[in-house]
Amino acid sequence: MHTPTPEQVHAADSFRSGQHLALQAGAGTGKTSTLCLLAASTKRRGRYLAFNKDIARDAAARFPSTVQCRTAHATAFAALGHRYADRLNSPRQPAWKIGQALGILRSLRIADYEISQRTLSHNVLRTITRFCHSADATLTHHHVPRVRGLDRPADHRQFAELVLPFAAKAWADLQRPDHGIVRFEHDHYLKMWALTGPKIEADFLFLDEAQDTNPVLERVFIAQRDHAQLVMVGDSAQAIYGWRGATDVMTGFDAEQLTLTRSFRFGPQIADEANRWLALADAPIRLTGTTSIPAEVSSVEHPDAVLCRTNIGAMTEVMHLLGEGHRVALTRGGQQLAQLALAARDLKEGRRTHHPELVLFASWGDLQDYTAYDPAGRDLQPFVDLVDTHGPDAILAAVSQLAEETHADVTVSTAHKAKGREWPAVRIGKDFPKPKDTDPGAPAASQPPEVSDLDARLAYVAITRARNRLDLGGLAWTASAQQVEGG
């Protein structure tokens, strides 16, 4: 490890004093090596809770033997989940079959829509997932997902009243360790464990990627503060998983707030671009690049990765690159897009689809009208445009041509899926929206653009994946808008 920075030394000193800590660690600032420094500074025994298995395994090789490195799921499995081991390996079965076994035997009507058994069954299972991610003790209306078409509050309330009794029945079924109707998932035993109010035996606890913690785990972690020293580590500006229940628990955590701001991934030019977005995201830190790392912001003809805002933007990029004759990899997105394309083909050929996003539409024309005229359908507009431009078969053909990353010339990814990764040369995709000017008459440099917090955080994540060369691509408009906070 390099010589610790003053910020890392300060973090180690604060840790030794026994205080609870919230460590804001910017992109590439040596988060794990800092935690290793903290752990090595004491003989006390600790636990490190990781975001996923790979991170836990890598950490275990770097931390001293006094620290046990596990995911939250592994911790819950050891305490309670092992009782359900037999159910975890049960074969997959379609949601409608599970729904049938729970008593969902016919379709129902709400407003102008027929809710099929399949749709009702799928949403019962989604309700359970949302409940498992929450800190709530009981199932309630707000765990029931919203369905496209049932956008009025009264319609959603009616839908929730249909779903909840079956969701309660499903949750009761999941409590049985031996056998049951509902397919048992890892999030189920994590929730059951959390509901027992567990005590984690350790002198200190590290929670990694704290900005993406589900409320269920946040509550368990914070409940340990009376007997263990708590250290949350993460980057509030990389909190991009709100859509799946995650919340940024760092900024409100009652602890000493510390920062890591020197990035060892890239040089000052890329740090300057990152700081534009940290300012727009109202983040608590700004980054400093490492001057010895060669890094530039310029046009990149042959990037190692193209990073997009959405799956549809990524697919548009894939089709363009394939058309130019490149070997292209798509990070974990091909299957989702193939399913959407198959759903589009069904609708275009006059058949209903079972795709959960499009299940209430009787035809492709209905979906086109919904995306054109209903504000709730605007996020589907790029998908409709993609299908109208290329057709479902061309999309399916493109998915079938994708290469493995190890054999590809270029990797295309969304910013979400690129998180935690880095490449030498990165180009930003074209689907990051340029904001509307607040005052069209004012010069660009005099006012910050109207950018949503989420878009600012996604742009920050995308930009900070580059090590040496960054092509701003769809974010190039920022070069003329000099809105860097503090210069």
Image: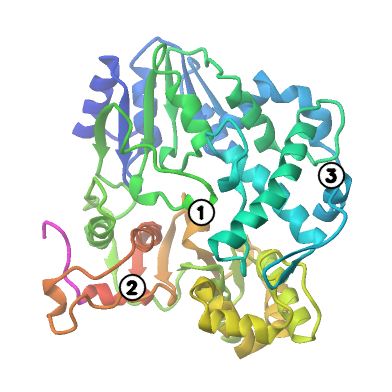
- Number of the label disc, if any, that sits on residue 484: none
Q: Indicate whether residue 482 is drawn in magenta.
A: yes
Which residue occupies the foreground of this view, 288 or 120? 120
Relative image position of residue 342 (x, y in whole percent): 75, 75
Name which quarter of the figure residue 268 lies in. Answer: bottom left
Which callout, 2 or 1, points to the residue nearer the camera? 1
Relative image position of residue 365 (x, y in whole percent): 67, 87
- Quadrant location of the C terminus? bottom left
Q: Which residue is mark 1?
A: 243
Which residue occupies the foreground of this view, 213 or 153? 153
Identify the residue shown where x is 69% and y is 45%: 164
Q: Which residue is mark 3?
A: 102
Identify the residue shown where x is 52% and y is 71%: 376
- Number of the label disc, if any, that sits on residue 475: 2
Local crowd size for mark 3, using a 10 Å CA cut-off: few (<14), some (14–19), many (≥20): some
Q: Is residue 301 left or right of residue 283?
A: right
Q: Is residue 327 left or right of residue 48?
A: right
